[in-house]
Structure formats: C-alpha cells, structure tokens
Amino acid sequence: MELIKQTYSAQETKQMAQQLGQSIEQGLLITLQGDLGAGKTTFAQGLAKGLGIEKTVNSPTFTISKIYYGRMNLIHIDAYRLEGLHQDLGFDEFFDPQWVCVVEWPKYIQEILPKNRIDIRIIRIDEQSRLFHFTCDDTLAHVLEGIV
Ligand code: ADP
Ligand code: MG
C-alpha cells in the first residue's frame, strides 16, 4: 500500500512520526530515503518519542548505529558512510521482532534489508514543507493507519 502525507514544519513531521511510533506493537523495519536535510533524522526523533524513548535521537557522527531503550527498543542506523562497503556488519540481528529498526540511507545496505518493511521517501518542497511517501506490503498497512 502507499500513503502520501505533506507536513509544513519540522514539528508536524515529528508529530506524524510520533503517531506512527505509538501504533507500533512489535519490531518493524522502517527505511528513510531523502537528500541531506530532507528530514530523516527529524522523523526518527518523533518516532522514538512515540516508542516511549526519552533520549533525543541525533545523527550519529562517528557511529553507524545507536540503540535507544523505551516501551519498544529502537536501533537507529545511518548507513551514509557505508557506501561501497559490502561487508557483514551484523545488522541482520536487529531485523527482529524485538527491535524497531530505522535505517537512513538504506540504498547502501540494500542487499541485507528484509522485504517486510515500511519504506519512506522524503521530498523537500521548500524550507518548511516536506512530502512523505510511504510504501509497504499490504500486511503492514494497519501500522500506517496510526497516521492521521
Ligand atoms: P536528514 O536526516 O534527512 O539529513 P534532518 O532531519 O537532520 O535531515 O534535518 C532536516 C532539517 O529540515 C531540520 O533542520 C528541520 O528543522 C528542517 N525542516 C524544516 N521543515 C521540515 C519538515 N516539514 N519536516 C522535517 N524537517 C523540516
Ligand atoms: Mg540524518
């Protein structure tokens, strides 16, 4: 299924992602595609809040992945620096019902991503506005119903 949503501020993006986080009942893989500054990390921050995580998610500068604990645990992977690196980093352990996993720059680890996931493509419309294009298998459609 597909869903398109436009937001008009970073705050609105966080609220939308938080709603999604609140409706997640078990481990799920979410990928976020979009240029630098599109809003991938902003989305991840709202999602984490919806998962009951109190720490602020930020773009890890020196690490590829970071773990956050809450009602549901989150692993945030930024694959940006993995371009061209085709080695086993052990991420597949996290594609597991115990973890919600968010991947920024999924194209760099495409070959290890399971098919059962929600893909989100973010397009920058202007300074404050972004278009979110959600795609997922019909079996996951109920998760997107949390977004209004
Ligand atoms: P990315 O992780 O994709 O590189 P970030 O989330 O780090 O992007 O940065 C997005 C920037 O765009 C932030 O400074 C944020 O405040 C700003 N922004 C402005 N409008 C929006 C919006 N509608 N949704 C998300 N971010 C927005
Ligand atoms: Mg980012």
Image: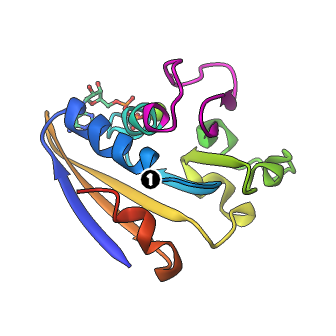
Q: How many numbered marks, from 0 up?
A: 1
**Which amino acid does the dot numbered 1 rest on?**
Ser
Is 49 located above or below residue 93 in the figure? above
Expressed as whole percent of the image width and height from the top left, the position of residue 62 reads: 67, 19
Q: Which residue is mark 1?
A: 23
Residue at x 44%, y 63% (from the top left corner): 143
Q: In the image, is residue 64 part of the stretch drawn in magenta?
A: yes
Residue at x 57%, y 65% (from the top left corner): 117
State which quarter of the image contains the N terminus: bottom left
Tell whether 128 sits left or right of 83.
Answer: left
Expressed as whole percent of the image width and height from the top left, the position of residue 18 reads: 37, 40
Judge by depth and name the residue closer to the eye, 24 or 118: 24
Magenta span main SS: loop
Tell whether 15 sits left or right of 87.
Answer: left
State which quarter of the image contains the C terminus: bottom left
Q: Residues within 10 Å of mark 1 (few under 14, many from 20)?
A: some
Q: What is the span of residues highlighted in magenta in the rendered image?
A: 48-75
Is 116 located above or below residue 81 in the figure? below
Q: Secondary structure at mark 1?
A: loop
Q: In the image, is residue 148 part of the stretch drawn in magenta?
A: no
Expressed as whole percent of the image width and height from the top left, the position of residue 137 reads: 50, 78
Using the rendered view, name the quadrant where residue 22 is placed: top left
Using the rendered view, name the quadrant where residue 8 is placed: top left
Expressed as whole percent of the image width and height from the top left, the position of residue 94 reads: 76, 49
Residue at x 44%, y 39% (from the top left corner): 47
